[in-house]
Image (tube, grey):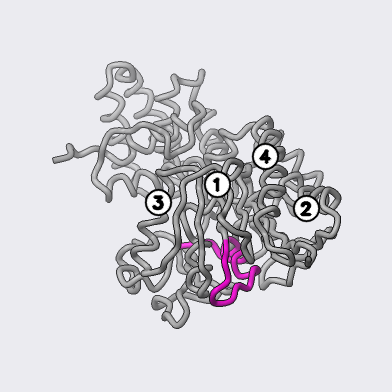
Amino acid sequence: MIAPIDPRRLAALMVQGVIDGQMLPEVPVPAADPATRAQALRLALATLRNLARADTVLRPHLRHEPAPPVIAALRVGVVAMLDQGEAAHGVVNATVAALKAAPATARAAGLANAVLRKAAAFPGWADLPVQRLPGWLRRRLKGVYGEETLQAIEAAHHRGAALDLTLKPGATPPAGARAIGASWRLDSGVQVSALPGYDSGDWWVQDAAAALPAGMLAVQPGDTVLDLCAAPGGKTMQLAAAGAAVTALDLSEGRLKRLRENLARTGLTAAVVCADILDWAPPAPVDAVLLDAPCSATGTIRRHPDLPMVRKPADVDGLTALQARLIDRALGFLKPGGRLVYCTCSLLPDEGEAQIAAALARHPGLTVATPPQPLGRATPEGGWRTRPDDHEAGIDGFYMALLRRAPA
């Protein structure tokens, strides 16, 4: 049996791990029951979206910044009280108890008690500015979108993400779901596995923007399709549900385990291959390829507020070179006249518009003809882009383009 642990303590450990340079899933934390872990994760995500606000509240009450475990606990405490609406006495008592329980932080328990009691009375939480992106990323995006749009993107990041579902053909959406593009949206905070249709595989979780690229391929029953970088499988399931003969390939066996589980739950079929695209080739050319290339994931910050705190400029530079190699490789898998959808969940043109412009220059006879989508906008080189501020409740930022090889 797992020993009880306060979710605020877990959340503080998660926040400290991210500040130290780890993505949330990689942060080591003590084992906890699923409900406690889910509560801690929600609180950690809320804290990461409100770090600057929390520091604004704490700063007047601190002569010096405390040790990392202490400041993490204080930040979580402030967000729990002022953003999540938890009772101040419970938050203060739990934070003090957690600090006392660890020898390295026991001496800070009195400080935490005094500071959090004062912080609980802060009057203007909702009026504080939302979290800004880190300087290097903010400068790049401001140069592309302008300050006004960038502020709207940051506001969308602050609001977080709802729960979007892609339905199998003929399936009924859960009660209360509302249409967004070709997807269905529910408010966040629901337990996914408890929703009607989950056990029967009627739908799967997939952001409304992430569902657009597979639909763009417009596959027909019997089409041979490669889904490259396929895990966790949302696009694979879309293609299989449309009747295509799908081969789903990914480099990570761990991620493919989740893809196989999703296929089994939904009753859909695809051939699953664990391999490196750069070292692998299909036995015969195919009708269509979907390449969801590795990228900076800067379009998903509303779901992953840890990402901008961990990602560095050098990461993007290495990814853009890989993306170009993957496009060239994927084009070689197509039959004459075959089609390729290239997409990334990035807001950076280097990983989107510029990649397609460069691919068209490298491959004479290659054309781009991206059909209009229900969300987002056309781009000058012929692709399509969504931004987090494109919908009142937000969507992920994606780039996508439909390319076609010249006929024989």
- Element under disc 1: loop
Q: Position of residue 313 (x, y in %)?
A: 68, 32
Q: Locate the C terminus and report the quarter of the image it occupies.
A: bottom right
**Residue identifier under label 4:** 322
N-terminal-most mark, 4 or 1: 1
Tell whether 14 sits left or right of 97. Answer: right
**Quadrant of residue 259 in the image?**
bottom left
The magenta-colored residue range is 205-225
Verify whether residue 194 appears in magenta. Answer: no
Marking on residue 291: none
Distance CA(mark 2)–CA(mark 4): 14 Å
**Residue identifier under label 3:** 85
Distance CA(mark 4)–CA(mark 3): 45 Å
Amino acid type, mark 1: Gly
Residue 171 vs 44, above or below: the answer is below
Label 4 with label 1: CB-CB less than 8 Å: no
Label 1 with label 2: CB-CB less than 8 Å: no
N-terminal-most mark, 3 or 1: 3
Label 2 with label 3: CB-CB less than 8 Å: no
Q: Identify the residue at horizontal 28%, vertical 36% (top origin).
A: 94
Residue 111 vs 379, above or below: the answer is above
In front: label 4 or label 1? 4
Q: Position of residue 201 (x, y in %)?
A: 36, 70
